[in-house]
Image (cartoon, helix red, strand yellow):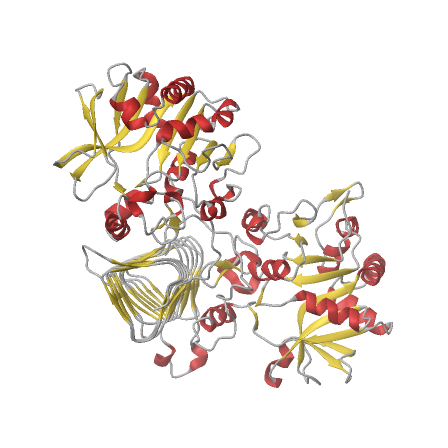
């Protein structure tokens, strides 16, 4: 698909913040760092741009400082445009400002942004799914099937104890949604809704207005579940690699999945690159005693010790005699000499002093909060 | 409307860089990759931005495609400005005819209109092929404090190397009394770094005079030139203008030859290297491709090296600089080498003391370069070089000092 003024992208940057409490304490879901140099919003945003969408609105709720800083004018995604481009949609001051009650409420509150768009179709996406997907195929199916709503889903194992805020779709042979379950209490392979939806602009506006007038703000509960017989709701199966960030444990797992070459190659393709804000760091530097195995290392890292099975974000320092294993080390973390860091997530700019040890476990990694000094 | 600028920088980027041979076959020298993720021109452009100079003319002539594309609108260096910014200035045609740039002074002469739009007090003239971090604003302050007409940045070089440079002879007050290009018996060790600050009214006058003078000589069939060091500086000295030497202390490297390009990269791996690429207050900016972080595999063995984004390393890398998007397969060995963007070193290949250009494929079994220890006569040894987009087949050997520009 080439330049397409017919489709508008709408990203919900603050949905599901509560699932990753610690990480989203001072940021939105969308601005959670991921994969060494990205933030979660980079995935839906790049997917939209790579699918030919040139007008995107990003809806936020609170704590959006880091998101604003990251997105800037949208230049990194080629969205600093006169026609279309990137629009940040923070909540504006109304009596209940700062709190969207659900996607429907949020859509209604950005009504004037939608009014100004000439787009015929809208792609809605949250930021909790890490994947590479060509939305133009979803739009194509949506138009051809004459659906009211098309939900993107993927097949994977669902575990009600380990996953949260998960919507599961039941489909007939024609991929029409017959039932919608929200966080059901069973486990097994399911059609997991990837929280990406395609609707026509007119339908979206109608649904939003209707929802607000009835006080029904949840897209999942009040539209997908309650109206499944009234509307034609279709599923679109995304067969590519995806992973859902719905808990700190799953965040840890999702990052470490990138060490699998097959999954990494599925996420980072030549045709659909993931764009992000440039950091202008120097290349990663490996010292004379460095030993690095099976790890993803971002630019600006200076490694003097041992790193195994880990993700190091930009500008991380690992001192001499230090061992970092099975860990996710966010931007700017400094780990001194002779430390032992195993199964740990350090948030940004953590300092671990010489000789200190920090150990979590594979199932429950130790999370060290932003700017902490150990 | 163009608002007045105190300072405009003119960057001479037209050089062919013929002594870089295969590496500058299709690219201008300032676009040659350096230091894992940079190109040479990133240094003067970043220095400009960091020094508060926001108007830069880049004079291009030789193989400008890659360079033009790289500079683009100047955004990576924060030089996409409403007023000023970076402008690529190739030679152009006028009613009087078209002409190539006939020397460094002529290149600026032909672009006097560009400079005059900004009505500057000072013009900073820069080269595009040196590695250094320098605050040009301090040099301009020095120029102003001395009430100078021209200030030339100099660096103290070892006496044994002085005859390779343009040498300034100064009095105690840093006033230049003489300038000799590559003297056999140097009287001083202050080498010109090819960085000049001129008061624009003076430079303008000398550019016009040099142009008229050289053209007259050409008509008379005499030898002529339109060069900064040779003509402008020499005539300014002859006319007793105020020329001052500004002594620079810090890392500065001319990368005019393959050996010096290799050396300059190796310098980055020296733990006491004074060129700090990690200082957040003086970043060197570059145009980045969108690549994921580098992946280091299970079989990798990396020591004392620099590696950039998008690379996939599963082999042995020792004392090397690896650029973005390079693949080094398990069982491949890269030592004391520079591997430029997008190159693939296959399993079983050995690359030592070499420069491998962009987009190359080195097949398993190929051998590029050799350890100098195996050469009793060190003069017979040198860096092995593989040019851009070259494929080296499995059984081939590229000997030290050999330069390959085509598939073998």
Q: Position of residue A261 (x, y in %)?
A: 25, 50
Counting the numbered discs, the total is 0
- Rendered view: B262 above or below B187: above
Q: Which quarter of the picture shows residue A285?
A: bottom left
Q: Can residue B394 be seen in this view?
A: no
Q: In this view, does A179 lie to the left or right of A87?
A: left
Residue in front for this viewpoint, B20 or B307: B307
Give left or right: position of A115 versus A222: right
Measured as percent of width and height from the top left, residue A249 is found at: 24, 51
Residue at position x 35%, y 38% from top?
A15
Q: Quadrant of the N terminus of chain A?
A: top left
In x, y percent, where is residue B271?
A: 43, 76
Q: In this view, does B335 lie to the left or right of A366?
A: right
Residue A26 placed where, x, y %? 40, 50
Q: Quadrant of the C terminus of chain A?
A: bottom left
Furthest residue in direction right, as rendered:
B239
Farthest front residue in view: A95
Q: Can residue B283 be seen at all in this image of the molecule? A: yes
Figure quadrant of residue B44: bottom right
**A176 or B192, which lies in front?**
A176
Q: Examine the rendered structure and indicate whether residue A119 appears above or below residue A372.
A: above
Residue A183 in the image: above or below residue B377: above
């Amino acid at each position: 698909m080439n330049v397409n003024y017919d489709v508008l992208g709408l990203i919900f940057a603050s949905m599901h913040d509560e699932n990753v409490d610690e990480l989203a304490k001072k940021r939105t879901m969308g601005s959670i760092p991921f994969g060494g140099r990205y933030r979660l919003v980079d995935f839906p945003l790049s997917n939209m741009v790579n699918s030919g969408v040139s007008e995107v609105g990003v809806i936020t709720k609170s704590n959006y400082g880091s998101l604003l800083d990251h997105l800037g004018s949208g230049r990194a995604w080629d969205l600093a445009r006169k026609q279309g481009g990137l629009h940040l949609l923070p909540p504006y001051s109304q009596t209940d400002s700062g709190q969207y009650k659900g996607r429907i409420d949020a859509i209604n509150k950005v009504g004037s942004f939608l009014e100004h768009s000439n787009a015929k179709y809208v792609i809605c996406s949250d930021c909790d799914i890490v994947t590479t997907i060509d939305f133009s195929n979803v739009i194509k199916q949506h138009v051809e099937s004459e659906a009211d709503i098309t939900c993107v889903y993927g097949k994977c194992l669902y575990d009600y104890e380990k996953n949260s805020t998960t919507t599961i779709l039941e489909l007939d042979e024609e991929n029409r949604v017959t039932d919608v379950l929200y966080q059901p209490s069973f486990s097994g392979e399911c059609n997991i809704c990837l929280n990406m939806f395609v609707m026509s602009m007119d339908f979206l506006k109608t649904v939003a207005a209707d929802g607000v007038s009835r006080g029904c703000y949840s897209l999942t509960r009040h539209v997908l579940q309650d109206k499944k017989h009234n509307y034609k709701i279709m599923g679109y199966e995304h067969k590519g690699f995806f992973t859902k960030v719905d808990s700190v444990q799953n965040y840890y797992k999702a990052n470490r999945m990138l060490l699998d070459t097959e999954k990494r190659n599925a996420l980072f393709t030549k045709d659909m690159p993931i764009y992000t804000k440039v950091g202008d760091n120097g290349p990663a530097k490996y010292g004379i005693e460095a030993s690095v195995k099976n790890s993803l290392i971002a630019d600006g890292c200076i490694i003097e010790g041992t790193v195994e099975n880990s993700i190091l974000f930009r500008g991380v320092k690992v001192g001499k005699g230090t061992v970092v294993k099975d860990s996710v080390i966010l931007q700017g973390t400094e780990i001194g000499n002779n430390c032992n860091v195993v199964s740990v997530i350090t948030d940004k700019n953590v300092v671990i002093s010489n000789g200190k040890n920090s150990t979590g476990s594979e199932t429950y990694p130790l999370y060290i909060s932003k700017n902490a000094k150990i | 409307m163009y608002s007045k600028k105190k300072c405009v920088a003119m960057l001479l980027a037209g050089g062919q860089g013929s002594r870089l041979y295969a590496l500058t076959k299709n690219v201008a020298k300032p676009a040659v990759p350096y230091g894992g993720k940079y190109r040479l021109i990133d240094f003067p452009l970043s220095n400009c931005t960091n020094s508060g100079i926001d108007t830069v003319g880049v004079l291009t002539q030789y193989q400008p495609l890659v360079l033009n594309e790289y500079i683009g609108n100047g955004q990576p260096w924060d030089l996409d400005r409403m007023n000023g910014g970076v402008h690529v200035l190739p030679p152009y045609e006028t009613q009087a005819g078209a002409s190539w740039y006939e020397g460094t002074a002529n290149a600026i002469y032909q672009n006097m209109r560009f400079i005059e739009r900004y009505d500057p007090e000072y013009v900073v003239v820069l080269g595009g092929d040196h590695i250094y971090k320098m605050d040009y604003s301090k040099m301009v302050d020095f120029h102003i404090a001395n009430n100078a007409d021209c200030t030339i940045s100099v660096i103290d070089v070892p006496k044994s190397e002085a005859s390779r440079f343009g040498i300034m002879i100064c009095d105690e007050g840093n006033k230049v009394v003489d300038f000799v290009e590559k003297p056999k018996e140097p009287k001083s060790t202050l080498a010109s770094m090819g960085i000049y600050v001129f008061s624009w009214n003076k430079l303008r006058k000398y550019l016009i005079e040099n142009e008229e003078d050289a053209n007259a000589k050409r008509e008379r069939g005499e030898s002529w030139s339109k060069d900064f060091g040779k003509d402008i500086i020499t005539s300014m000295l002859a006319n007793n203008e105020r020329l001052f030497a500004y002594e620079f202390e810090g890392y500065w490297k001319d990368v005019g030859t393959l050996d010096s390009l290799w050396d300059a990269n190796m310098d980055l791996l020296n733990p006491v290297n004074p060129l700090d690429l990690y200082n957040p207050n003086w970043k060197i900016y570059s145009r980045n491709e969108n690549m994921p972080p580098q992946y280091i595999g299970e079989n990798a063995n990396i020591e004392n090296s620099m590696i950039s984004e998008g690379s996939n390393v599963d082999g042995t890398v020792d004392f090397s600089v690896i650029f973005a998007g390079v693949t080094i397969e398990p069982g491949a060995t890269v030592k004391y080498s520079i591997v430029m963007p997008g190159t693939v070193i296959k399993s079983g290949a050995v690359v030592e003391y070499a420069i491998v250009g962009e987009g190359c494929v080195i097949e398993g079994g190929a051998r590029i370069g050799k350890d100098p220890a195996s050469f009793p006569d060190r003069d017979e040894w040198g860096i092995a070089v593989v040019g851009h987009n070259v494929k080296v087949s499995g059984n081939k050997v590229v000997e030290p000092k050999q330069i390959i520009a085509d598939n073998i």
